[in-house]
Amino acid sequence: AYTGSITLDTNSYVMAPKNIYDIGVKMTGAENKKLVVTSSRTGIASVTKLPNGNYRVTGIAPGITYIVFDVYDGG
């Protein structure tokens, strides 16, 4: 089980299709852990990792989605 923490700079955000929003993410206690960030509804928003370690959310269509942060074993 992951015993560290994940700190996000955003907990809720409303955006229009084609808009982008960057989420700042900081993991502590994450040695040998892999963070995977996805949209719960890929037709509503997409997520890509940026070179600086943050994640970019891009609006695709109107609707509600959750940005999911999963932590897995392995680098």
Image (cartoon, rainbow, N blue to C red):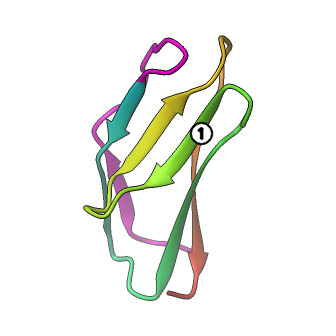
- Of residue 8 and residue 22, the one placed in the foreground of this image is 22
Disc 1 marks which residue? 46
Q: Can residue 57 be seen by looking at this rendering? A: yes
Whether residue 6 sits left or right of residue 52 in the image: it is right
| Quadrant the N terminus occupies | bottom right
- What amino acid does circle 1 point to? Ser
- Of residue 50 and residue 14, the one placed in the foreground of this image is 50
Q: Residue at x 41, y 43 (%)?
A: 56
Whether residue 41 sits left or right of residue 57 in the image: it is right
User: What is the magenta range?
Assistant: 1-19
Please, what secondary structure does the residue beneath circle 1 have? strand
- Of residue 24 and residue 31, the one placed in the foreground of this image is 24
Magenta stretch contains residue 6:
yes
Q: Residue at x 47, y 37 (%)?
A: 57
Magenta stretch contains residue 8:
yes
Vertical comparison of 41 with 29: above or below:
above
Whether residue 1 sits left or right of residue 25 in the image: it is right
Vertical comparison of 66 with 64: above or below:
below
Question: Please, what is the dominant secondary structure of the magenta stretch?
Answer: loop
